[in-house]
Amino acid sequence: MAAADPAFITRLAPGDEFTHDPGEAKNYNESMYFNVFDAQVKTGGWFRIGNRPNEGYAEVSVCLYLPDGRVVFTFGRPAIADNAAMNAGGLKIEVIEPFKRLKVSFSGKALVLARPLEMADPKKAWRENPSLPCTVELDYEGVSPMYGGETLKADGTPLDIDPEKSFAKAHYEQHCSASGVVTVGDERFEISGHGLRDKSWGPRYWQAIDWYRWCPMNFGRDFGMMLSTIGDGKGGAREGGIVFRDGIYDLITACHIDSDWDEHGYQTALRAKIATAAGRSYEVTGKVLSLIPLRNRRTAPDGTEMTTRITEGMTEYRCGELVGYGLSEYLDQIVDGQPNGKVAGF
């Protein structure tokens, strides 16, 4: 692994689990994200609040994958007055003990999709599928160390960031266990599984990244991974991630992901070859069990209409004899109707 750049340091403190001063950047975004997958009942989900206090709203997403292939989903942009808490649109995230225990709860209506690919046309999907009352009560426990934080200059001062080109100025992740209850209409699902959570803050536009592949997974309480490849805007990719094993994180130094696609350009399977700083190598395969396509659209200052597609697939992973579960999240800018990462061969 290359030596750390002496021009920068990474800082992470327990207080970072709570909200930060948003400053003046219009597109400031403070985001907390959690996922969980129960290997026994083949049920999982993910939850996100992204506060945009300087724009007066939050991005709120709840997504559940049910055992029969249905996906339960809701998204909203509820108004918020400030960045005081991660609590909007019925979704609430509480820090019980920083880096150790957190709670995720939701109460509201959500769309029940028997054919989740219909979300490619959101207006039609919302019009033609039922919405049912939904609740989530999940207790999260951190089972790994923390990975990441805020990158600063060597003297501890903040980096100079162009808000128009920023995705986040700080980011951290942690493998977790989670347990609790989810209800959808009259159905009740008890969940006890594993997942990954992350947090980021700083100016963000979803169009600031060319494309990425993000694959968090768990093979039990003591073994998990997060695979990451990010388009560099020059036809190549930055490869990285982490392997959680033996109570520590082993940094990934090489991560080549090869994907299979359906006729819509959505991932259906993947194969990954991984090398780590500790000299270990892994081969992982993934089979997408259920996928929902999402999007974010923005008009650039010059009037250009930009569309970002994010496909979220509940994925069964295999590493040697081990079987685990997690997510395959593929983000692409859509150019001439095509996902640019797939066009580039990623």
Image: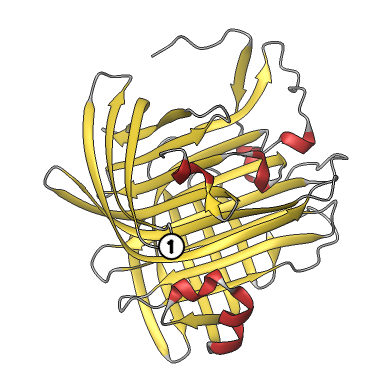
Residue positioned 24% across, 42% down in the render: 284
> Which of the pair 250/308 is nearer the observer?
308
- Tell me residue 30's x, y (percent): 69, 48
Q: Residue 238 at x, y = what percent?
A: 47, 27
Observer-nearest of 14 and 166: 166
Question: Which quadrant holds residue 71?
Answer: bottom left
Reply above or below: 67 against 248: below
Q: Tell me, what colour scheme is on the image? A: secondary structure
In the rendered image, the residue lying farthest to the right is 24
Q: Is residue 36 above or below residue 236?
A: below
Q: Is residue 98 left or right of residue 176?
A: right
Q: Which residue is pictured at 59% across the width and 37% down the height?
A: 171
Q: Quadrant of the N terminus?
A: top left
Local secondary structure at mark 1: loop
Q: Quick check: 13 above or below 127?
A: above
Relative to 298, say whether 120 is above or below: below
Q: Is residue 265 shown left or right of residue 135?
A: left
Rendering coords of residue 108 (x, y %): 61, 80
Q: Which residue sits at x=35%, y=31%?
A: 255
Q: The disc labelled 1 sits on which kind of residue? A: His
Mark 1 highlights which residue?
264
Location of the C terminus by quadrant is top left
The answer to whether residue 229 is seen in the rendering is: yes
Q: Residue 332 in the image: x percent, y percent? A: 54, 48
Furthest toward the left, the residue is 321
Label 1: how many Cα within 10 Å (few below 14, some 14–19, many 20+): few
For the question of whether residue 250 can be seen, the reply is: no
- Give residue 228's quadrant in the image: top left
Q: Is residue 148 left or right of residue 25?
A: left
Residue reaching furthest to the front: 336
Residue ID at (52%, 78%)? 135
